[in-house]
Image (cartoon, helix red, strand yellow):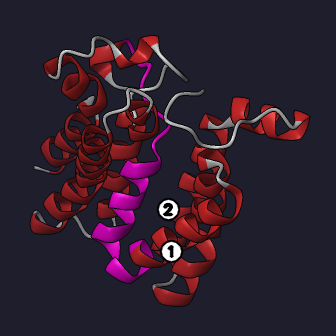
Amino acid sequence: MTFITLALAYLIGSIPFGLLLTRVAGLGDVRSIGSGNIGATNVMRTGRKGLALLTLLLDGGKGYAAIEMAKQTNLGNLVILAGFLAVAAHILPIWLHFKGGKGVATTIGVFFGLDWVLGAIVCVIWLLAFLMMKISSLASMLSIGYSPIVAYLLDGDATTILCLTLAAVIICTHRHNISRLLRGTEPKFSSRTN
């Protein structure tokens, strides 16, 4: 049962909602525009804000669903592993030859599944950082980067370790953004630019 639950966590996390929604909407392959990503920020670049919001919610829902499923099957500390697998699957989905998104929304969904207060605080940090700097990638890295501190204050060791691990993963998925930030060429958010 444990293996099945963890496998399902990966399969749920690997559903490429951004790609599926843009294709169903007749917008083609979202990977051919902007950053080439399948996430909500790139879906926003199609000009379809509602579709981007739906992508954000569904990608977050994958992380939340993986945690809830693991809780319902009484996996104990392996609930943490289910959350990690959901995020890893979004980044490395089997259906897309292991080339997916950056994992931010799914990570935040995992946080909400573990502790809604953790998820809410991370969202507030993201929003404040984005409003100040208008750079989605930087807001994402800052909010997820602060999550281990928030988790430590709220929940303790197991969640803190997951948050540290996911923060490292999210920073890794944003390595090209970091290079652009250091060069001063990372664009401020626009629905039409990379």
The answer to which of 77 and 108 lies nearer the viewer is: 108
Q: Is residue 184 magenta?
A: no
Amino acid carrying mark 2 in the image: Leu
> Dividing the picture into quarters, in which one does residue 185 lie?
top right
Find residue 61 and report its horizontal and vertical position in percent. Answer: 23, 53
User: Which residue is the site of mark 1?
Assistant: 124
Q: Are marks 1 and 2 in contact (CB under 8 Å)?
A: no
Other-residue count near label 1 (Cα within 10 Å), few / some / many at <14 / 14–19 / ≥20: few
Dominant secondary structure (helix, strand or loop) of the stretch shown in magenta: helix
**Residue behind mark 2:** 162
Q: Which residues are magenta?
A: 97-119
Counting from the top left corner in percent of width and height, residue 48 is at: 31, 34
Closer-to-camera residue (101/187)? 187
Q: Position of residue 124 (x, y in %)?
A: 50, 74
Q: Secondary structure at mark 1?
A: helix
Residue 160 appears left or right of 18: right
| Image point (45%, 85%), residue name | 155
User: Front-most of 17 and 2?
Assistant: 17
Q: Earlier in the sequence, mark 1 or mark 2?
A: 1
Q: Classify the position of the C terminus by image quarter.
A: top right
